[in-house]
Image: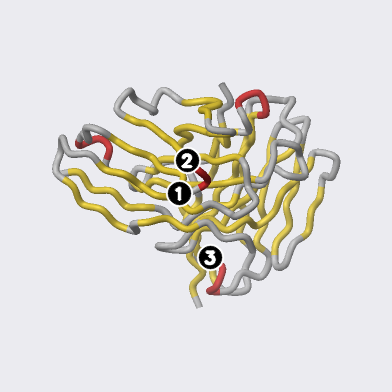
Amino acid sequence: GEQVEQRPPHLSVREGDSAVITCTYTDPNSYYFFWYKQEPGASLQLLMKVFSSTEINEGQGFTVLLNKKDTRLSLNLTAAHPGDSAAYFCAVPRRSAGNKLTFGIGTRVLVRP
Amino acid sequence: GPKVLQIPSHQIIDMGQMVTLNCDPVSNHLYFYWYKQILGQQMEFLVNFYNGKVMEKSKLFKDQFSVERPDGSYFTLKIQPTALEDSAVYFCASSSGLGPNQDTQYFGPGTRLLVL
């Protein structure tokens, strides 16, 4: 089945710096993906749905890049601030299995003042 | 955004007892999911459910697990009997459809289950 590898598992950055999280996936036919943010003790909050037709997606304070050739997805938190401290998960849906999501292991980001 | 509720938020139970985890999905959603996350590990798919039936289940969905949504009420995950390895956070999710414009899964806050 689909495998998703996410790195790094932990990331500590200074406020104002950028933070990059990368996921690689195995199914080259995957054509959309999700990034979720999870603050401590809270639910998963959808950050962005990424379609393979767009290589660069911009959100509020972050950019998502998709490299289909290398089956790699990355989330770049630009100018990180303390509110960005959370766990971030990439997820790949498998349409043949009722859209079950295969998650990366998560990246725990700490933004230091 | 759309909200999924889960009750209870925490549950402590003795091994061998039965437990029911409740999920109140987004009101117009038709597809429902359970995921399991052991502390510090990856979130893993358990089961999905549509129109009163299980669509797909993983190998983590043991025979002791069952799901139902009677008459549009809570979507429930029942474990009977519980085992120590069932200790985890269980997340419920729902989506309105399966197509690329409908399949975003919205997650509840999780139920933290501790089996002693």
Residue occupying image coordinates x 74% and y 25%:
A29
Relative image position of residue B49 (x, y in whole percent): 53, 34
Relative image position of residue B68 (x, y in whole percent): 44, 36
What is the crowding at mark 2: few (fewer than 14 residues within 10 Å), some, or many (at least 20)? some
Say left or right for A9 vs A36: left
Callout 2: chain: B
- Residue in front for this viewpoint, B8 or B84: B8
Residue occupying image coordinates x 34% and y 43%:
B38
What amino acid type should be assigned to the residue bearing mark 1? Tyr
Vertical placement of residue A101 versus B56, above or below: below
- Mark 1–mark 2 Cα distance, whole angstroms, equals 6 Å
Quick check: do tags 3 and 1 share a chain? Answer: no
Q: For residue B67, what is the image quadrant?
A: top left
Relative image position of residue A5 (x, y in whole percent): 55, 35
What is the crowding at mark 3: few (fewer than 14 residues within 10 Å), some, or many (at least 20)? some
What amino acid type should be assigned to the residue bearing mark 2? Arg
Which label belongs to residue B74?
Answer: 1
- Mark 3–mark 2 Cα distance, whole angstroms, equals 44 Å
Q: Is residue A11 visible?
A: no
Which label belongs to residue B69?
Answer: 2
Q: Nearer the viewer, mark 3 or mark 2?
A: 2
Residue occupying image coordinates x 14% and y 43%:
B14
What is the crowding at mark 1: few (fewer than 14 residues within 10 Å), some, or many (at least 20)? some
Residue found at the far bottom of this picture: A113
Are the residues at dot 1 and dot 2 in contact (C-beta closer than 8 Å)? yes
Which label belongs to residue A13?
Answer: 3
Vertical placement of residue B1 versus A67, above or below: below
Vertical placement of residue A31 versus A48, above or below: above
- Colour treatment of the image: secondary structure
Callout 1: chain: B
